[in-house]
Amino acid sequence: QVQLAESGGGLVQAGESLRLSCASSGRPFTMAWFRHAPGKEREFVGIISWSGGSSRYADSVKGRFTISRDNPKNMVYLQMNSLKPEDTAVYYCASDDTYWGTSPREYDYWGQGTQVTVSS
């Protein structure tokens, strides 16, 4: 059983940056970030492989968000730059030992989420 805990959310203005962190109790194969805005479905943000050598992003955040991981510390980070009001959501990290993809239903482990609010 892997436990995940996000931190780093907050209120920022449009154009500013924020870095989210996800602490993991293990070292799963895949680490991903999702977000959930009110009235919308949970949305894939990005994913990174165990080695950190492979990553993938949603088109809506590509070029602005970067995922990285520090395996010795069992940490994954989501650097968010040039934030927009439409990035406002609860952000979750998720992990899985075998799945590599964008479907939230396939991930076995989830954190509790951290709120990111971007004001215009």
Image (cartoon, helix red, strand yellow):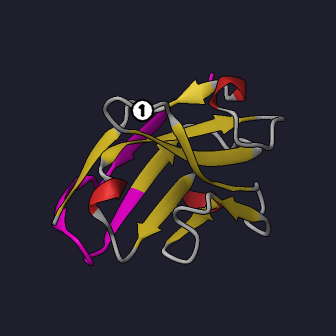
Q: Nearer the viewer, residue 47 or 70?
A: 47
Q: Which residue is mark 1?
A: 40
Instruction: Name the image quarter holding the N terminus.
Output: top right
Q: Is residue 55 above or below residue 22?
A: below
Amino acid type, label 1: Lys
Locate residue 115: give its quadrant: top left
Image coordinates of residue 108 in percent, x first then y, are 66, 24
Q: Nearer the viewer, residue 60 or 24?
A: 60
Residue placed at 41% from the left, 55% from the top?
21
Q: Is residue 79 above or below residue 71?
A: below
Q: Nearer the viewer, residue 9 or 83?
A: 83
Please provide the residue range marked out in magenta.
1-20
Q: Is residue 2 above or below residue 83?
A: above
Image coordinates of residue 23 in percent, x first then y, are 47, 46
Image coordinates of residue 7 in percent, x first then y, are 32, 49
Locate residue 58: give its quadrant: bottom right
Q: How many marks?
A: 1
